[in-house]
């Protein structure tokens, strides 16, 4: 009864609540109209994000607007209560967290774009198409490649690459195309879960300093299980026949393999800066960007000489030696909508945390439910809501957990999005690439099999890494 009266007092007399806490370092606005308004704004913004496929409104736009409005409301309340610099310090902290992740991702995206422009991925696709594999072989090959490419490249780029192969050889066989695309989404998300570079959520956990680089590899076998279980079930539904032979000729442009090597060197630099020098990983990534810039300078200075050295046919196929390489074009082609969406999410969720809602959620999930049910629920939630805000919310809650539980939430947030086609960037992208073939309901038919893989991977992690709990 006392709790009910307290809540009513907060709702009816919010000014009293603020006055009583104005001397505190931070105001609890969870029962204040501003808090309710902020929650409503965030929910509305995220409904627009989820409806992007139908509205064609880029997902960054609503969350950026929501972030600005939420912090404007917070700033107004704090200024009114004589605490003008408290909110300012909090939002600067959120901006610092975002800037580190944004610059890190920007370097990674620049390298991926450079490899794409050098036709590294096209050459791989052509090789697979020309080998004459059967549908079942291609199902496993594209899945395994997605699993192992995703830890280095992001799951979105990996899924789009493998999907291009599947759609090129699948032709009119929609059953194969659908099952192969589902398999690619599951494999790309699973592969990204055991590497700090495989997904934004794993990157956030690593950069936060919660887990060391090598600790993520404890999730390798659980991630394999998450991929293999549904793949083994879907294998028997794949037509046991060969596609029509294709002949695609794509030659990698000059410097493609060197850029791949420089990207691996950049990753090693970032890891070394973090592990041995105790510096932010983003500093190592930006140092690695300089590697690409110097190599791009070399390609640009030598392109005329190189193109004249080729015979006519080879020069036509190696147009990279005719058109100068420009690293800043690769930076400009980064997924800016994704980067700005990430800004909106970090700042908006940071605002909700500053209002006190994440502390409430942490108390319910990690104190009342317990860490294991809470972390499993995080994975299920990431199938509906993007895993970026879910993981950022967990990190902002700062629950007291051991390494085993942090690995569990990293696993579930990464692979939980595979349960629905809208649960991950890879799934959403493939719905656009294979519009009308790979759909929400086509994926939903196999959610039960993916769910078995999800449950099995959790069990394997808790059994295999029991000493970490």
Image: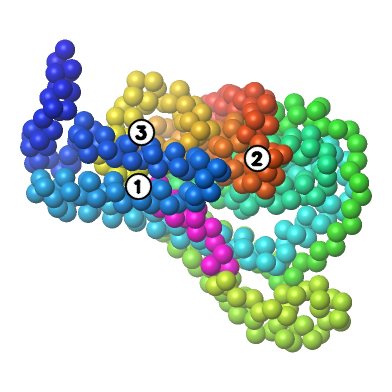
Labels 1 and 3: the sequence-earlier one = 1
Q: Residue at x 84, y 76 (%)?
A: 314
Q: Nearer the viewer, residue 232 or 134?
A: 134
Residue 343 in magenta?
A: yes
Residue span colored magenta: 330-345
Which residue is under mark 1? Answer: 66
- Given the current orientation, which residue lies at the most extreme top position? 1
Task: Choose mark 3 or mark 2, whichever is in front.
Answer: 2
Residue 399 is labelled as 3
Labels 3 and 2: the sequence-earlier one = 2
Where 318 falls versus 379 (above or below)?
Answer: below
Q: Alpha-carbon distance for marks 1 and 3?
A: 26 Å
Q: Alpha-carbon distance for marks 1 and 2?
A: 30 Å
Task: Choose mark 1 or mark 2, whichever is in front.
Answer: 1
Q: Residue at x 57, y 47 (%)?
A: 198
- Tell me residue 418's x, y (percent): 60, 35
Labels 1 and 2: the sequence-earlier one = 1
Taking the image as shown, residue 166 lies to the left or right of residue 355, namely right
- Given the current orientation, which residue lies at the most extreme front position? 55
Residue 168 in magenta?
A: no
- Tell me residue 3's x, y (percent): 17, 18
Q: Element under label 2?
A: helix
Q: Residue at x 45, y 47 (%)?
A: 204
């Amino acid at each position: 009864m006392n709790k009910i009266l307290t809540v009513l007092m907060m709702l009816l007399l919010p000014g009293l609540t603020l006055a009583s806490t104005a001397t505190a370092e931070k105001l609890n606005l969870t029962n204040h109209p501003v808090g309710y308004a902020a929650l409503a704004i965030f929910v509305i913004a995220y409904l627009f994000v989820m409806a992007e496929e139908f509205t064609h409104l880029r997902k960054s736009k609503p969350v950026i607007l929501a972030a600005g409005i939420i912090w404007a409301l917070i700033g107004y309340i704090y200024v009114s209560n004589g605490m003008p610099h408290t909110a300012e310090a909090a939002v600067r902290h959120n901006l610092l967290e975002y800037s580190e992740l944004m610059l890190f991702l920007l370097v990674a995206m620049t390298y991926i774009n450079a490899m794409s422009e050098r036709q590294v991925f096209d050459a791989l696709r052509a090789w697979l198409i020309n080998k004459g594999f059967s549908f079942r072989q291609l199902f496993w090959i594209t899945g395994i490649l997605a699993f192992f490419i995703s830890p280095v490249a992001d799951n979105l780029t990996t899924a789009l690459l493998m999907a291009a192969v599947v759609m090129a050889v699948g032709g009119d066989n929609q059953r194969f195309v659908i099952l192969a695309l589902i398999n690619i989404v599951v494999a790309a998300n699973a592969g990204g879960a055991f590497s700090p570079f495989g997904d934004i959520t794993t990157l956030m956990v690593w950069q936060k300093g919660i887990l060391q680089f090598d600790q993520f590899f404890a999730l390798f076998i659980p991630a394999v299980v998450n991929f293999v279980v549904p793949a083994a079930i879907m294998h028997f539904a794949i037509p046991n026949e060969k596609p029509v032979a294709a002949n695609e000729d794509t030659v990698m442009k000059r410097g493609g393999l060197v850029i791949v090597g420089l990207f691996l060197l950049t990753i090693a630099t970032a890891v070394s800066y973090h592990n041995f020098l105790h510096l932010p990983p983003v500093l190592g990534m930006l140092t690695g960007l300089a590697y690409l810039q110097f190599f791009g300078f070399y390609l640009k200075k030598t392109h005329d000489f190189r193109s004249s050295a080729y015979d006519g046919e080879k020069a036509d196929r190696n147009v990279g030696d005719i058109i100068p390489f420009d690293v800043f074009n690769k930076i400009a082609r980064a997924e800016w909508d994704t980067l700005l969406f990430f800004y909106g999410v970090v700042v908006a969720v940071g605002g909700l945390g500053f209002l006190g809602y994440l502390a409430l959620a942490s108390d319910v999930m990690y104190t009342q439910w317990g860490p294991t049910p809470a972390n499993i629920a995080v994975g299920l939630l990431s199938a509906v809501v993007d895993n970026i805000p879910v993981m950022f919310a967990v990190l902002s809650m700062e629950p007291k957990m051991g390494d085993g539980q942090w690995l569990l939430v990293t696993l579930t947030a990464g692979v939980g999005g595979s349960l629905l086609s809208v649960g991950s960037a890879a799934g959403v992208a493939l719905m656009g690439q294979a519009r009308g073939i790979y759909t929400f309901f086509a994926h939903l038919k196999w959610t039960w099999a993916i769910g078995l893989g999800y449950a099995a991977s959790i069990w394997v992690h808790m059994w295999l890494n029991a000493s970490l709990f």
